[in-house]
């Protein structure tokens, strides 16, 4: 007769259990950061999805509790652990039951989207236009994985659980891969969404170009004027209400390539004239510029919206030049009040010369009308790098 016995190797088993448990908890923390950051990034793009997101979180917490309550068997693996043990095949039924809230939530939003008549199931799952379906699927999956990783980590660290070393090694490898991926994501997230590195254009573009107007405060009483110089210089600008008598001065003493003056205490709905004693490469029709402050009473207003100006070739650059020339023709008639640029000013964010080409052209109209720009994907300069010096914030 052969007798089956559970063989224990206290030292090695203890070490690998400790490592596997810690890796599992760490991987769970990493995926948690990933899940919450996704919600933070896409919240504005997926309006009305708070409820499916909350259901996913609550369902995973409840699922964790169900796993912990029903899965009390000493064996912590699906298959046989050591001679004499049967394994824990009950998990094949416990795990789906534990996360039934997430699964039912997904099918509920799928049914509400009418996938059976309008779209295929796969299209519904992957189409962000069905935002509730998308959030229910992604959040439900991520939070379920988080719950399983935390549960597995606590289970492995439980000294009463008997776990086969081979299973632990495979699981530890899996958790290590998840952890490496999440650490890489955290690095990218911090670099691209929370840290704005020093803009390369602060070192100059090698050109004297500009100026352009932006808002930094109340548009009724404030304006910001910016321009580049080829060499480091102090900043000085003359302005006033009378074009023949620019009796006010805005200046900064520090020598810089990128010049910015912030003018405040202006009168509402008033035309101001300004002059900068620089020889700009920008082909302006005059060295005297002007702008009008916003009114302090309600009235209709008009604005220009444009985007994707990146001069990737001569055709695009010439098209931009023609378009801005047309804007200048109507600019003198006060037909619009400001400009919104939707992003992708430059083809490649790291290319300072590309910045010069587009800003040198845009400044022809931006010297007269406040121009507010957004950051496009081309400004970020995603060239397979995690840290992108092409992400400029003027």
Image: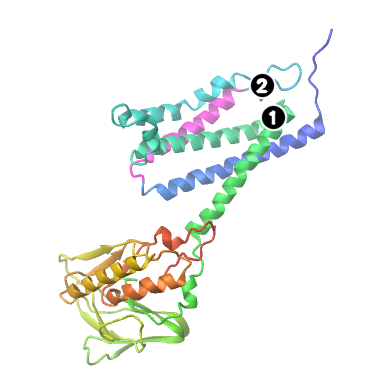
At x 22%, y 65%, the residue is: 303
* Residue 164 counted in the magenta span: no
Q: Where's the C terminus, which quadrant?
A: bottom left
Picture disc at residue 367 = none
Among the two numbered marks 1 and 2 on one chain, the one whose residue lies closer to the N terminus:
2
- Residue 291 appears in which quarter of the rendering? bottom left
Question: Which structural element holds mark 1?
Answer: helix
In-image side of 103 versus 322 (left or right): right
Callout 1–callout 2 Cβ contact below 8 Å = yes
Magenta stretch: helix, strand or loop mostly: helix
At x 39%, y 32%, the residue is: 122
Q: Which residues are magenta?
A: 46-71
In-image side of 141 versus 4 (left or right): left
Count residues near mark 1 (Cα–Cα under 10 Å), then give few for <14, some for 14-19, many for 20+.
some
- Residue 282 appears in which quarter of the rendering? bottom left
Where residue 18 appears, as percent x and y from the top left, is 72, 37
Q: Which residue position is annotated with label 1?
A: 167
Mark 1–mark 2 distance (CA, rounded to whole Å): 9 Å
Q: Which residue position is annotated with label 2?
A: 79
- Tell how many labels: 2
């Amino acid at each position: 007769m052969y007798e089956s016995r559970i063989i224990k190797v206290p030292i090695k088993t203890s070490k690998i259990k400790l490592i596997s448990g810690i890796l599992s908890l760490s991987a769970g923390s990493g995926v948690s950061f990933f899940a919450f950051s996704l919600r933070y990034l896409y919240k504005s793009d997926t309006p009305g999805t708070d409820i499916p997101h909350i259901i996913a979180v609550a369902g995973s917490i409840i699922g964790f509790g169900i796993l912990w309550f029903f899965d009390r068997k000493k064996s912590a693996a699906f298959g046989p652990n050591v001679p004499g043990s049967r394994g824990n095949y009950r998990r094949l039924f416990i795990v789906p039951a534990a996360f039934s809230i997430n699964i039912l939530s997904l099918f509920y939003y799928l049914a509400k989207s009418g996938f059976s008549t309008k779209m295929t199931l796969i299209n519904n799952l992957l189409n962000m236009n069905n935002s509730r379906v998308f959030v229910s699927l992604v959040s439900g999956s991520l939070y379920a994985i988080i719950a399983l990783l935390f549960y597995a980590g606590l289970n492995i660290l439980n000294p009463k659980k008997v776990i086969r070393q081979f299973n632990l090694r495979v699981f530890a490898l899996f958790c290590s891969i998840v952890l490496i991926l999440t650490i890489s994501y955290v690095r990218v997230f911090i670099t691209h969404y929370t840290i704005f590195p020093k803009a390369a254009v602060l070192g100059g573009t090698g050109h004297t170009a500009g100026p352009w107007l932006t808002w930094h405060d109340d548009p009724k009483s404030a304006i910001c004027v910016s321009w580049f110089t080829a060499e480091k210089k102090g900043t000085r600008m003359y302005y006033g209400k009378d074009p023949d008598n620019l009796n006010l001065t805005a200046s900064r003493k520090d020598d810089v390539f990128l010049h910015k003056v912030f003018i405040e205490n202006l009168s509402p709905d008033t035309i101001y004239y300004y002059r900068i004693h620089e020889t700009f490469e920008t082909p302006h029709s005059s060295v005297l510029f002007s702008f009008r402050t916003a009114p302090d009473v309600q009235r209709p207003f008009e604005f220009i919206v444009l985007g994707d100006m990146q001069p990737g070739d001569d055709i695009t650059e010439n098209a931009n030049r023609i378009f801005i020339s047309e804007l200048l023709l109507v600019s003198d008639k006060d037909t619009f009040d400001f400009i919104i640029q939707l992003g992708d000013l430059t083809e490649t964010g790291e290319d300072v010369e590309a910045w010069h080409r587009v800003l040198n052209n845009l400044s022809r109209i931006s010297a007269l009308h406040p121009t507010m720009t957004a950051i496009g994907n081309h400004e970020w300069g995603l060239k397979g790098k995690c840290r992108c010096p092409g992400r400029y914030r003027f």
